Image: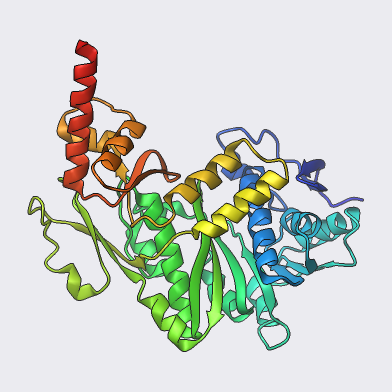
């Protein structure tokens, strides 16, 4: 079948499909190649799609009934095809794309995978497709927003097209605004100020969830985050939305601000703007940078993470990057916002690089909770204040010095 552009056969998960031929995807100019492709397909987002399969399966089992799913920006259709083939209990999937070439290619791939009885492809704008399903009896159980860039232009439509208790998955790839390179763009899009710091990716995820929670509250819907992660060049959240004004108000109570001192690395949170105070650091007196308003609540539910791990193991995925990600997120679930970069704190103290696990051990010995984080390979999540973290690093350095003299 001719599409007017070169294609190649790709296999991912249980799906076998046609995708545009774009050349060497490992090249440094991959983003340029992807943006110029006649139909969008990003092979580097396979992990994203792997996680989506597990998350939707766990959600379906919890719900205990068949699901109606929507992927309104389908590209080649690989995500929807994988969800249809790999997730038990998916009754029907509606895929869409404004690009007529993408809709045509996705339709072919759906037929090629023998899914025409359960998957339909529409050549429609995202917001129009979702608006057509915003009325009672037409809404979806699961909507997957995975745009190239920011998802904020589609969040209102997605919230309205999701059933009460439904699961909304949202990806943001515009990390420059979210991480503080373009703060004005972040404020315009997400309604909050970013923070250019060692934990900027966590702040980016919290800004994304904060924007979703604010939009959902306008429709009297509460937001509960089942799972979220920061990987490579994007952040992603899976949120359960429940209708109810009281729940929506409680979700907004999870909004607030993160204050960060670049001089001494102290940080604190404030749920109300008046609690920000004069912005002076209570450790060193220096000026603190302020991020927000953003989401200060949990980023993942520990039991949901555990069920995703069990599902991955049932599928034989006991090793590899996916399982490492899931286990790290499970271990850090329930910790307060932000983390400490071991090298950053050590540099401030004039100490050499020290082992991450060593700092965790010393903090736990001191009565604090501590864990590695998926946000940064040298990051430590803890409930310890900055002074205790510094003292723990000094103690660890002394232990190493003593051990070296023996």
Q: Residue at x 66, y 83 (%)?
A: 134
Along the viewing direction, whichever of 87 and 100 lies nearer the viewer:
87
The answer to which image quadrant residue 125 occupies is bottom right
Residue 265 seen:
no
In the image as oriented, which residue stretches furthest toward the left? 285
Residue 259 in the image, given as x and y percentages of width and height:
23, 59
What's the image's color scheme?
A: rainbow
Residue 215 in the image, given as x and y percentages of width and height:
47, 77
Residue 355 in the image: above or below residue 405: below
- Answer left or right for 253 relative to 123: left
Residue 243 in the image, given as x and y percentages of width and height:
54, 84
Quadrant that contains the C terminus: top left
Residue 101 seen:
yes
The answer to which image quadrant residue 189 occupies is bottom left
- Answer left or right for 168 relative to 61: left
Along the viewing direction, whichever of 162 and 103 lies nearer the viewer:
162
Q: Residue at x 49, y 50 (%)?
A: 330
Residue 185 in the image, given as x and y percentages of width and height:
38, 62
Residue 374 in the image: above or below residue 224: above
Q: How many marks?
A: 0
The answer to which image quadrant residue 257 occupies is bottom left
Q: Residue at x 44, y 52 (%)?
A: 175
């Amino acid at each position: 079948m001719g599409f007017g552009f070169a294609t190649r056969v790709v296999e991912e998960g249980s799906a076998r499909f046609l995708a545009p031929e774009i050349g060497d995807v490992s090249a440094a100019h991959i983003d340029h190649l992807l943006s110029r492709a006649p139909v969008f397909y990003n092979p580097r987002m396979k992990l994203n799609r792997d996680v989506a399969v597990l998350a939707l399966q766990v959600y379906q089992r919890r719900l205990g009934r068949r699901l109606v799913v929507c992927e309104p920006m389908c590209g080649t259709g690989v995500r929807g095809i994988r969800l249809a083939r790999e997730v038990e209990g998916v009754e029907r999937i509606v895929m869409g794309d404004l690009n007529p070439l993408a809709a045509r290619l996705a339709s072919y791939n759906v037929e090629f995978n023998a899914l025409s009885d359960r998957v339909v492809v529409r050549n429609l704008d995202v917001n129009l497709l979702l608006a057509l399903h915003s009325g009672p009896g037409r809404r979806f159980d699961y909507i997957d927003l995975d745009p190239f860039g920011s998802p904020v232009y589609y969040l209102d439509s997605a919230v309205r097209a999701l059933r009460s208790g439904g699961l909304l998955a949202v990806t943001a790839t515009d990390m420059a605004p979210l991480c503080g390179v373009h703060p004005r763009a972040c404020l315009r899009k997400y309604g909050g100020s970013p923070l250019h710091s060692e934990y900027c990716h966590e702040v980016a995820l919290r800004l994304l969830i904060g924007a979703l929670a604010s939009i959902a509250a306008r429709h009297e819907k509460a937001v509960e985050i089942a799972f979220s992660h920061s990987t490579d060049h994007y952040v992603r959240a899976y949120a359960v939305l429940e209708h109810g004004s009281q729940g929506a108000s409680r979700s907004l109570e999870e909004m607030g601000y993160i204050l960060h001192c670049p001089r001494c690395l102290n940080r604190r949170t404030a749920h109300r703007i008046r609690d920000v105070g004069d912005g002076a650091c209570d450790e060193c007196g220096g000026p603190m940078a302020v991020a927000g308003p953003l989401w200060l609540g949990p980023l993942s539910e520990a039991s949901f993470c555990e069920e995703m791990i069990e599902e991955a193991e049932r599928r034989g995925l006991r090793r590899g990057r996916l399982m490492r990600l899931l286990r790290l997120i499970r271990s850090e679930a329930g910790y307060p916002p932000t983390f400490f970069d071991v090298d950053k704190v050590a540099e401030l103290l004039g100490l050499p690089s020290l082992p991450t696990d060593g700092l965790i051990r010393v903090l736990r010995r001191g009565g604090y909770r501590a864990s590695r984080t998926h946000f940064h390979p040298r990051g430590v999540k803890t409930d310890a204040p900055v002074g205790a973290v510094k003292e723990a690093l000094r103690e660890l350095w002394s232990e190493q010095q003593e051990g070296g003299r023996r």
